[in-house]
Amino acid sequence: MGTPALLRMSVNSLTKLASNHASERIRMLIKKQVILSKRERSWFKLEVQERSIVDLALSLKVSFKSSELLRALVSIFGRLRQMGSRPFGELLARGSRLAWSFSEAAVSWGNAAAKRWRSDTSYMVFLGIFSQPTRT
């Protein structure tokens, strides 16, 4: 099932919910997603118009009956999800390369157990995090 089909299903199911209860539930889900995206730093990669739509939907206490508004919000959060997954993948890729290099060096020095480092995800994430360029 592709992303557009999933988005259409989400919009259709959300528009069928009861107005007051559903609007409050949708608002809570949006707030949680905004908090998570700010933690992942993907919130600020959105365009100003996209952030404004979400901010207005939360601050104006709108009822989420408009399918256009829901489609816009689902589209925005789809982009946030895509942006949020990239940094972790980049960390893992960088850490994997380092773990492989360190493992090869340790094995060449006689540490046969170092081959396990190549498949240790925690070690790869650790290396990926601590090998990031520092921001000044």
Image (tube, rainbow, N blue to C red):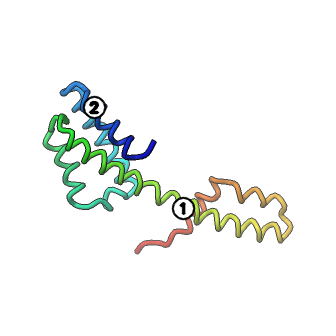
82 lies left or right of 22: right
Name the side, left or right, on which 30 lies relative to 109.
Answer: left
Judging depth in this view, the residue of 15 and 111 nearest the camera is 15
Q: Nearer the viewer, residue 110 or 101?
A: 101
Which corner quadrant of the image does residue 8 belong to?
top left
* Count of numbered circles in the view: 2
User: Splitting the image into 4 quarters, where does residue 83 fall?
Assistant: bottom left
Q: Amino acid at mark 2?
A: Arg
Q: Position of residue 45 (x, y in %)?
A: 32, 62
Q: Residue furthest right?
A: 110
Which residue lies under the disc numbered 1? 91
Q: Can you give x and y, in whole percent of width and height, for residue 11 in the image?
A: 29, 37
What is the number of the mark on residue 42?
none
Query: Which of the labelled discs sits on residue 25, or is there none?
Result: 2
Q: Residue at x 40, y 75 (%)?
A: 136
The residue located at (47%, 72%) in the rendering is 134
How much space separates mark 1 and mark 2, taking CA atoms? 34 Å
Res. 32 image quadrant: top left
Of callouts 1 and 2, the N-terminal one: 2
Secondary structure beneath dot 2 equals helix
